[in-house]
Amino acid sequence: MPLLDHLFAHGSIFAALLTLYLLAIMRFTSPRVWAFADYPKEITDAVEPQTSDERRLGAIIGIPFFVLMLGFPVISTLMLESTYIGPIPLIDAFLNVFGLALFGTAADLFILDWLIVGTITPDFVIIPGTEHMRDKEYKDFRVYHGKAHIKGTIGLAILSLIIAAVIVMF
């Protein structure tokens, strides 16, 4: 049971860290920076395309996110391996990395996408110029993003297997 205990403890921490980071980004920058490409086409077609400065800032604030997304599962899996006698089996490494990814994506989907953007829809998630879409298109964001998360889970599984294999090999 050390794998499950480890996964639930680290998964909860990971989900909280990701959610807090993304929520801070959402609150203190424009949705044109942090989510323009994630919004449905009906919303983004109603405004001017992202500027190069907005894309650049989005890439910069995305760096800590990607470091956390890749670094936390690696460190967590190495910590899990230290509890084993000998090397960690590939399946355990994969289950830890993929499990963490699922914790993070579930928190993003349920808390940020469905609750905050799709249900509460505060002003800071509305792209300027699309305020009139708050009651329809922004509510449809829940279904739109739910489908994207389901599709993304396949990619997360493949990436998790690659990360786990690298950890096991070294």
Image: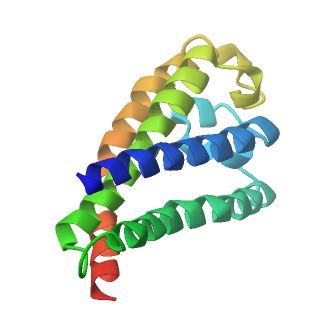
Is residue 117 visible in the rendered structure shown here? yes
Q: Position of residue 39 (x, y in %)?
A: 56, 37
- Seen in the picture, residue 59 relative to 121 is either above or below; the reply is below
What residue occupies the far bottom of the structure in this picture?
170
Q: Which quadrant of the figure has residue 146?
A: top left
Q: Position of residue 111 (x, y in %)?
A: 53, 29
Residue for point 74% across, 63% down: 56
Residue for point 35% across, 61% down: 97
Q: Which quadrant of the figure has residue 89?
A: bottom left
Q: Is residue 142 left or right of residue 154?
A: right
Q: Position of residue 168 (x, y in %)?
A: 28, 81
Q: Quadrant of the C terminus?
A: bottom left
Residue for point 76% across, 22% down: 123
Report the front residue among 110 and 5.
Answer: 5
Report the front residue among 85 and 98.
Answer: 85
Coloring applied to the structure: rainbow
Q: Position of residue 107 (x, y in %)?
A: 48, 37
